[in-house]
Image: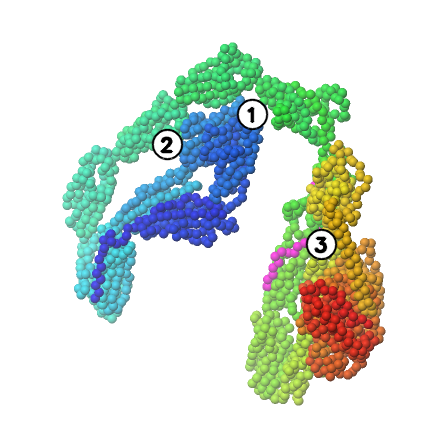
Amino acid sequence: MYVLLLSLPGEGEATGVLRVPSFLQEPPPLLQFGNDTGAQVSCMAHGSPPPVVTWVMRDGTVATQLPGLRKISGNGTLHFPPFLAQYYRTDVHETTYRCRASNEAGTILSRNVQVQAVLRRQFHVHVENTEVYLGNSALIKCAIPEYVRPYVRVASWHRGEEILLPESADIASRYVVLATTGDLYFSSVSSEDGLVKFNCLVTNTLNGDRQRSDEVTLQVKQLNQNMAPRSSQKPVMEIEVERGHDVHLPCNIQGNPFPIFTWFRVSDSAALYPIPSSQRLILSRTLLFIKNADERDAGKWICQASNQFGEQRIEIRLIVNTFVSVHILPQVQIVNSGGTAIFNCTTTGSAIDVIDWLHDGKPLQPKNSLSTGREDIRFLSKNSLLIQNVGRRDRGVYQCLVENQRASAQAMAELKLGDTMPELIYTFIEQNVRPGPLISLKCSASGSPPPQFAWLLDSQPIMDVSLHHRFAIGQFVDMTGDVISYLNISHVRPDDGGLYRCVASNSMGTIEHSARLNVYGPPYVRAIGAVKGVAGEDIIMRCPFAGYPIEQIRWEKAHQELTTSPHYVLASVHEGGHLVIKNVEPGRDQGVYTCIVRSRAGEEARRDVQLNVNSPPVIEPFKFPKNLQEGGRAQITCAVSSGDMPIYFAWKKDEHSIPSSLQINEKREEFYSLLVFKDISARHSGKYTCYASNAAAKVNYTAVLQVRVAPRWSHEPMDTAVMLGNAISINCEAEGYPIPTISWFKGQSKAFKDFKSLSMRNHSLLLNLATDIDEGYYMCQATNEIGTGLKKIIRINVNEPARFEQPARNVSSRRNDPITLDCHAKGDEPITIAWTHNNGRIDLNNFRFSIAEMKTEKGVDSQLSIVHSDRHDSGAYRCLAQNPYGRAEHLIFLAVQERPDTPANLEVIEVGSRTVKLSWRRPFDGNSPVLSYLVQYQPLKYMMAHATLGAAGSDWNGNNIINVTLPSTSISRSYDSDQRENAIVTGLSPATTFLIRMQAINEIERSAYTDAIVLKTQEEAPTEAPSNVQVQTGGESELIVIWQIPPRESWNGELIGYTINCSEEKQNINYISVVNNSLKSVIVSGWATTKATLRGLRKYTRYAVTVRAINSFGSGPWSATILGTTAEGVPEAAPQNVTCSALSSQSLKISWLEPPLQLHGGIIQGYKILYRPIVHQIDFLTKMEIKRTSNLETYVHTLLKATNYSIRALAYTSTGDGVTSQPLFCQTDDDVPDSPAAIKAAALTADSILISWLPPKNRNGIISHYTVYAREAGRKGQTKTHLVRVDEHGYPVTFEARSLAENQMYEFWVSASTSVGEGEPTSVVAQATNTRAPARIASFGQVVRKAAGTRLVLECMAVGNPTPRARWLTRDRPVTFSPFYEVTNEGNLKIHRVEGSLSGNYTCTANNLFGSDEIQYQLIAMKPPSAPQIIVQYASADSIRVSWDAPEDGGAPLQGYTLSYYASGESWVQTELLPENNAYTITGLKCGNQYIIKMSAHNMVATGASSEEINVWTKGKPSQAPNVNELIATNSTCVNLKLSSWHNGGCDIHHFSIEHRPLGDIRWTVVTSDISNAEENRENLIFCDFLPAKWYQLRISATNDAGKTTEHYHFSTTSLDGITISPPPILASEYDLMDNLINATNPTSGDWLTTFIIIVIITVTIITIALTIKHRSTICGPLSEGYESRAIRSDYKDEHENGRDQQVYSASPVKTVDKGNESEMYEISPYATFSVNGGRTGAPTKTPTRGVVPTGQTPHDYTMQFKTFGHPEGENLNATAYPLLPNANASFGHVMGKSSWHKQRYHNTEDESTLSKSMTIVAGSQGGHSKKSSGGRPSKIGSTGVVAGSESDTSISPNTEFSNMPTYRVPCKSSRGSDGRVVLDIFQPDSSTESNNDQISPALERRLNTPRHVGMAVESRSAVHCSRKTASQLGNQTLERRNCPSSSNSKDSGRPSAALSDASIAAITSGDLAGGFRPPVAFNDAREFGDQVECEREQRALDLEVQRVMENTREANLAKMDREELTSLLASLYQP
């Protein structure tokens, strides 16, 4: 047994006191900072427990840390560190944040914090220079850019040394810095202000940076003429000011005379009233200063300025921004549970946009609607929140958040719960348990006061049934104030089961929870007390049973079982088995009910339950009488009509006991209670509730008493007096019930009381501005329908000072007319009037003046009369009015008008071609503004003498007189300070003489004319355009324009040329607007030119062409637009976005977009799709296929399966095909494979058969496996299958069938499978098992095509029993082991290197005792393609078109071409072309440049040799200089260059360089070193600063693509009077050598020694070069005699850029050219007919690669045909030796390049390599510099007399790398082995040439192991230029040291040669020749070499000499060594 003893602590002991958070420091509404400074904002709050401060975004999401951008500290500080501009984020730096503080008591949010990070931007401030007039006021602005204005403020102004600050400026001073805008205002501008410099200083409020504007000097102007008031200020402007700040209202108006300023305020009725000056409103003529602006000042202000010439008004709208504030009342409410709370939000401030309500930081008012989504919370208005049925969830913090465009504010209030009903926090659940363990049930609840728990079991208290103390109950209060109660049951038993209930209750109410505890055991029903029911209600009777599981629960009454009916509802066992009785009635339902419980085992238990039914009391409705007023009487009765007795009554008022002070009497009886009210007052109003209770229930009823009270004053209005213009505010308030309505009325006049209703917003009478119409009687009325209401009549007196409606006006009168001046003063009496004239008193003693006054209703009228007006009566008349309330003045400007004077001093100051500018002294205007000036002029047809000029000018009445009224004039001041007016007269004719005069006109009359003056107009541009303009189509991208010369009379001078403009028509379908690209302009010289060609236009484009004429003055009008269209071309771009996708295994879908519109080049007729398969089979012919379509997509069918295709697309027009797109690769889908190509079956043993097959010809994918089918012959249905898995190469392709029957015939067939499925099977092959299996070959004979230089294995799988032996035959000879190939142990033939000589048939045979078999292979060796032959079709200025014929493909289909070209000084450019191409146009070339072009083809084997290099010039040449007269025009100080006269030579000129110097001077003055050839520079390029009457030299250089042209000119400036000076007697020569040296060194008078030293150095250098060339010719010359020249490969010539001085051609035939004697030698092939021509038709003359074609040289076309003899077949007598490179394993270098090897002799030794019989050896000179050979004789041939020839490589360049070096042929000696014997070729089956020595070397067996394979290694500095390398280039064969040859003879048809080059020398110097240098030797001839002893001696001497040279030379100094010595050593060996 467990007993839990817990106590319930008091309230003070439960928890600490909770306090909701509140802000100690709330963040500001705006945080603005710069990105370079950063900022932080703090938020501090307190509460209990201490609140957690976080930051949230506007949408409520929590703001997190962002490294480098946003940091949130633990103390609530939000920090924004400085950041770079590129890291700016709007969601971080331009957004709204809120501070959130929360704890257990609640959550609050701060007002919105608008964060604005400003990126640092450079800005510049300046002072706006406005018009400032003397004597007027001025307002100058400090112009701050708009993008920084929000945070940049004017800190101060500087006037010279004086500093003007905004806060210290006194409005009475002359200078005031305006508070809001920072503008500088100053009054009474003086002339001193024009002498002082002003600038402003601004401050960046974000980072404190300051910036000062540039100093500005004001241009102070004097107004000498009358001017009506005018202003540069906006007529309507807005000014914003914060409440409480000062503000200046500027009125920047100028006029002459200085205007009178009046300030007005616009009232609510739109009336204007003048503003009197006060302490808060300070007037300073053009400035109004308002101190501490508030809401009263908001509105419209008018500034009016007027003088006698006019009036100007400026309206200023003042906006006063008030602070936004908010308050919530009450701030703390304590409401009991179920009560009601109301929060009212009071706001202040302007333009409140949003009001939001929050509860614990969560919005209650989404989207600003008056609905919260909670039934117990609703909004009475936007400012009032109602919370009903207050519960636990409603407690916490409520906030009202208001917001406008500028800021936001929040206020908070707390809702606390008083006494609250209990709320269950935690409850227990239903459980099923076994008897015995401890059971614990838990309930938790909250409430105030803390609730107490009671536990019940089946509605009975627990303690009443726990007789054995197994039940323990305890409860306690946790840290949060919740009460927790436990019920523990120890050793639970089956009868402990039942419905357990925990009940929590306090003074506010009760709450309970129940759930069953089921204990396994027999059924049991415990006894319980009687159950009480209430009549008329439903009751639930629960059966108090225990035990589990229970199968059935039944109910009986009076031994009758109850069933479900409309009156009874029986619940199931799972629902508790209770009985529900509907609408209980005492007579029917009261009694004993029996509950019967039965278990599944059939056990039953039963118990009787007594039901007692009680009736509740019923209160009859009651209510108070209506219209109860104070002092009346009333009574109310609460009567109960039914219910059990006894009944108890109680009354409450407003939910509280009725206080005795109300004196309400209560009378009670058995069935009712009566309340009596004897003297009703307003305090009795409220809700009265009657409570009636008995044993059944407690009921109540409420009635409302409202006492009606008549209004009475709470604030009675009184009479008021106010000054005119001030605000009026009178309160009127009354109280009563219903609440009285306050109304205001106004009397219709000041004397009568006929009132009219006024509309006011509240109970107060408010008028912002008091005017005279506001004076009178007002009535306030308060009514609430009780009695007659209240009325109060008051009077408002508006004291009006003396004033005028208009402050000033203008009056004009003609001279001698009478004048009357009226003055109407308004205001309260008494008013006095006084007059002044020009600030002086008026002499009334003068009979001409009189004054009269008369009183009016509103004031006094005064009248001043003048009898005869005169000129001196003009001026300012002031009418001064004054009364006790103020004074005012009325200004009248009188102008006595008369005829103006005649303009004086008329003169001409500017003359144009059709205009003239006149100037005259301004006349007196007669006090009437001069309206205009009339100008008269007439032309003179001839020049007149001065004597007759007056007579000619006296006739102004002819028909040729022209009158012009000047529309406007300008004012200027002459040197003598006279004010002058200027005007421009238009409409004159060019180059014409005129007489001209003028007069002035005002409203009164015209003045007399001035004297006439004479002038002549200037020339002007032509006035008519060229006529009959025609446009014709020229060449590609060209238009030809033709026109006719305009009429002579329209030239207006001499024509010098024409301008042609050409622009694209926007209606073109391919029009693309490109700035400065669509317009082309061409200038042509000469007035008679009528034709021009426009080039460089877009193809097939319509152009608008216009032409205009040009004279020396300018250009004339454009002609009418003529349209012309260029010729159609081909598309200049490929189709775009080419895509493809596989549709099936044999079809593709291809789509694309058309080329860019501007690159169509014409009308696209359609598209071509070029596709070809990408197959890696070397013998597969991949032919390009083309499909045409006009759509933007197409489908290609019947393709190869599972094959990758290269796809290109092009567009074509009617002219031809366009650019091809880049290749796109797309693969067709896989498919089932074809059947295997062949199948064999061969018997292995008595029970096994080998099946072999060939892979399918078309695999259609990756073969995954083969399926072998087998069956016994003649039987069906017993087929066996075997899967043969293969590797990635498709092997194995054999299968051994085992466990077969002996001597049984079997049938086999095979199929292949891919990922798609199984393909077709092979044919059926039959084979029987056999113990004596005959020899069979399982392999298949095939035709094998293989690239030369690769390895190959021919399979021969021989099977049989016994196992046969495979033998190989070729050319009917057995194959034995050789360096070419070998037979492997498996019987396969392994070919080490496929060569052309190995092509042929190879037969494999196999035989044993029982049979034989054989297969045959046909081997075809394939080579790279030969070189194409290039033909030049044409060359233009920027393109070259070449064509070629397809070369021999070498046995493998061509894959494409590589076209290479370059210009001098540039690198190679390569273009890949398709194999179908046979022509190509190279575009984008430079004009007038030489290009080197070559081409190579490539197939699957390798890239072939390059073609001969050809030299082609693009069209164009350097520019041509004009003569001096066309180019230069001068005056006394300037030079005018007409660069358009410089002919471009066919290539556009890029820029000019211009220099000049005085004649005889040595220093050039650079005018410009790079001036563009733009149109603006082509005409009239003028530069000055020359001295008059002096000769100069001019040097001009023009640069275009073709080169630079420099020309020197001599010119002279004219004298000051324009006279040309004579030339000097001798003009210096520019080309004098000494003059050039002087120019180069710029010597002075003391630098002649330096000049002399330079001359000596140049002379010595020339002599040294000449001696060096001669010395090298002497050394190298003899070496070349008697030897044949050989050409090396063109790849290598990049290493020697300077060695291109002679032509050497190596083709078929090979030609050698010596430049010295122009002789040529050819190496030719046998039995071949050759055609040797000197120049190909259409091709350029063959010249040195980098030379220039000599002037005047023309190509010679000649042809010579001849036929050669034969030589032994297959002998390669023309192999080419290449430069040798060092190798780590050899003493000599690898051969670079490749050569033809064919059938020739090889010397196979273990330590030696053999070159071909005929090679070229080249001795290089130092540094690769060229040396001319001294002779070019052909070499001596052998005894056979046959010229050696071979199939030479045709890719050799016309200019080989070493063509500048002596080339010769070296006779070779026979090589010997290590034993001294002659080495012979071992394997030469097809050789037709044999050695005389048939002795075999003893080292034969050792040499047989040496591979017969000689490779060519490609290693050189130019190797990086090679795009393809074959396997032969990767060989590792070297030339090593050789033994000295013997003296035996050899009968070869050719002599081998060796190569020496710079690379050889590099190999020597690198240390690779440690064993000494040995030249290569082979067969020798005794006639050329001595005996062996002499040879060996010479060889040893050479070794020692080479070693000496190498030891004295370091590798790093290789370039510095004298290589001639080493070269001569190497060459000396070969001298005869």
Residue 227, numbered circle: 1
Residue occupying the point 73% across, 37% down? 1587
Query: Sequence-wise, which precedes: disc 1 or disc 3?
Result: 1
Query: Sequence-wise, which precedes: disc 1 or disc 2?
Result: 1
Callout 2 touching callout 3 (CB < 8 Å): no
Residue occupying the point 28% across, 35% down? 738
Residue 760, numbered circle: 2
Up the image or down, 1714 lies above or below 152; here it is below
Q: How many C-alpha atoms fall within 10 Å of the one at disc 2: few (<14), some, or many (≥20)? A: few
Res 1130 visible:
yes
The secondary structure type at the circle numbered 2 is loop
Q: Is residue 44 left or right of residue 565?
A: right
Residue 1754 coordinates in the image, percent (x, y): 82, 56
Up the image or down, 157 lies above or below 1442; here it is above
Q: What is the magenta range?
A: 1120-1143
The secondary structure type at the circle numbered 3 is loop
Alpha-carbon distance for marks 1 and 2?
Answer: 47 Å
- Mark 2 vs mark 3: in front: 3
**Label 3, on which residue?**
1485
